[in-house]
Amino acid sequence: MRRFMVEHIEPERGRCVIRGSEARHIGKVLRMGPGDPLVLMDRAGLRFLGRIESVGPGEITVSLEKPLPAPPPSPLRLALGQALLRSGPMDHVIQKTSELGVQRIEPFSSERTVVRLASEGMENRLRHWREIAVSAAKQSDRERPPDILPPVSLRDLLSRWGSMDVPRIILWEGEDTRDLKGLLREVPPPREAMGLVGPEGGFSVEEVAAAREAGFLPASLGRRILRAETAAVTLVALLQYEWGDLSLESAHGPRFTAHGGADVV
């Protein structure tokens, strides 16, 4: 069953009007019409089986037939702090980590960040990232898409997380005493965690020192030097594997079901 995201479902109204890109996709690309069934999802986690009533210029009216149970969220509330990357790699990080169940993505600028976003282009970039996250949420059948925060400086991000009583990990290729595998096996499965990944040029020694002071634990991914976007996806996948729901029966959380998404838009 094809799934579509809307801002808000109001069950008491008995119907929902879809506009914007989702309406264009339903009518122009998929050529769906009256009588066709679909699943509606909103950002609050509501889901309804619906049926198209009418297709008009720029909008689709759907009757709400019955509520559907949403898939349970990951037992791990995972935040990813990702240094700003070039558009292609950054889009890749947003898409893949959203599919993997990250709850929040916090972009930041650092000493070696190549990309500098002008304030006038920030809203467009945020809108673009959030559209990618919505698409990934539909693809992976998530309860809801992740929150994507406006970019801040690394200093501000460290300040915000400095008082948090949760595991905080910073990936650093210069770490030679602790690898991620060992760290994950040492820490009891938490309910919330934060992972920090640097830009294409990595973190400076001074930045890692500041992260240590804020309570972040530096960890290495081993001998390979990964691209920033690969490191981010690897980190999220490993955290979900050890602490989250990348298993059929998580030791402390719900079931995770993977699929190819052939019928997902």
Image (tube, rainbow, N blue to C red):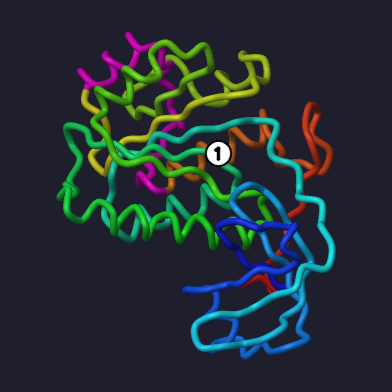
Q: Amino acid at mark 1?
A: Gln
Q: Is residue 125 above or below residue 22?
A: above
Rendered residue at 51%/42% (across/down): 234
Q: Which residue is mark 1?
A: 103
Give, as a single range, the part of the protein colored magenta.
Answer: 205-229
For this view, does 92 lie left or right of residue 67?
left
Q: Is residue 219 magenta?
A: yes
Q: Quadrant of the N terminus?
A: bottom right
Q: In the current view of this chain or complex, which residue is farthest to the front? A: 13
Q: Label 1 neighbourhood size at 10 Å, few (<14), some (14-19), many (20+)? A: many
The quarter holding residue 171 reads: top left
The percent coordinates of residue 12 (x first, y second) are 75, 57
The percent coordinates of residue 57 (x first, y second) are 51, 88
Q: Quadrant of the C terminus?
A: bottom right
The percent coordinates of residue 240 (x first, y second) are 63, 36
For this view, does 73 lie left or right of residue 170?
right
Q: Is residue 67 above or below residue 185?
A: below
The percent coordinates of residue 208 (x first, y second) are 29, 19
Instruction: Give 176 or 144, whichever is nearer the viewer.
Output: 144
The quarter holding residue 159 reads: top left
